[in-house]
Image: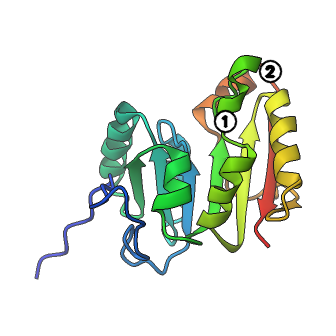
């Protein structure tokens, strides 16, 4: 009897305007799910999936070239616990994904939109907190990293002020948490990296 064909790495919803039912993304769906919000070229996503085969990982990315690259790399590595969705992150979290589906949300080095007139584009703002809260399971965690001090101060102030999240210490240094390409670039340039973690009570 032949083994079942693995699900394609790219997840394409049947209906982009209907919330996904529980279990739509992965089989088995009982594994803990972690979401890489704006997963870029997938470096972090794929390393996490390889290191934690007992967990499922979903990357959200709006650039099609990056999606194709992740799919090729995941297929070469034989990873069956990782999928990517080609969509805008705020919409995916707030409307498409099943509520309370994720144990961890990772937002790593999002575009800081450094010019003041563009700052409203930053992902961490009050309107998007509802989507983050909706996607997280109770007791789940939201992890954020940036090299941009102003964005870090603004983002942490927004999340700390929300009754939906409670600040936690950052991860223990011994815990596996890969360095993204962006992070390595900033480290090589001598830029300090700032990180924060919250839980959904």
Residue labelled with disc 2:
190
- On residue 109, the disc is 1
Density class for disc 2 (Cα within 10 Å; few <14, some 14-19, many ≥20) is few
- In this view, 200 is above or below 72: below
Identify which residue is drawn at 42% across, 45% down. Answer: 87
Q: Nearer the viewer, mark 2 or mark 1?
A: 1
Q: Can residue 50 be seen in this view?
A: no
Identify which residue is drawn at 76% across, 68% down. Answer: 200
- Res 94 → quadrant: bottom right
Residue 153 pos. (x, y %): 87, 36
Residue 68 pos. (x, y %): 32, 38
Quote the CA–CA distance across marks 2 and 1: 16 Å
Q: In this view, does 150 lie to the left or right of 58?
A: right
Residue 4 pos. (x, y %): 19, 74
Quick one: label 2 or label 1, which is nearer the N terminus? 1
Q: Nearer the viewer, residue 51 or 114?
A: 114
Which quadrant of the rendered structure holds the N terminus? bottom left
- In this view, 22 is above or below 8: below
């Amino acid at each position: 009897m032949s083994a079942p064909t693995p699900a394609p790495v790219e997840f394409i919803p049947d209906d982009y305007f209907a919330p996904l039912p529980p279990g739509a993304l992965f089989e088995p769906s009982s594994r803990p799910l972690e979401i890489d919000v704006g997963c870029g070229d997938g470096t972090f996503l794929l390393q996490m999936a390889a290191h934690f085969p007992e967990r499922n990982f979903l990357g959200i990315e709006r650039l099609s070239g990056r999606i194709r690259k992740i799919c090729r790399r995941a297929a070469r590595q034989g990873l069956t616990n990782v999928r990517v969705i080609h969509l805008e992150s705020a919409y995916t979290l707030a409307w498409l994904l099943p509520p309370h589906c994720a144990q961890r949300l990772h937002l790593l080095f999002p575009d800081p939109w450094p010019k003041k007139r563009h700052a409203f584009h930053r992902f961490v703002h009050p309107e998007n907190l509802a989507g983050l809260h909706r996607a997280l399971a109770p007791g789940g965690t939201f992890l954020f990293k940036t090299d941009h001090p102003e964005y870090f101060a603004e983002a942490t102030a927004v999340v700390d002020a929300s009754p939906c999240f409670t600040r936690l210490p950052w991860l223990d240094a011994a815990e596996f948490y890969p360095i993204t390409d962006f992070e390595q670039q900033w480290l090589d340039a001598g830029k300090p990296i700032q990180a924060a973690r919250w839980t959904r009570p």
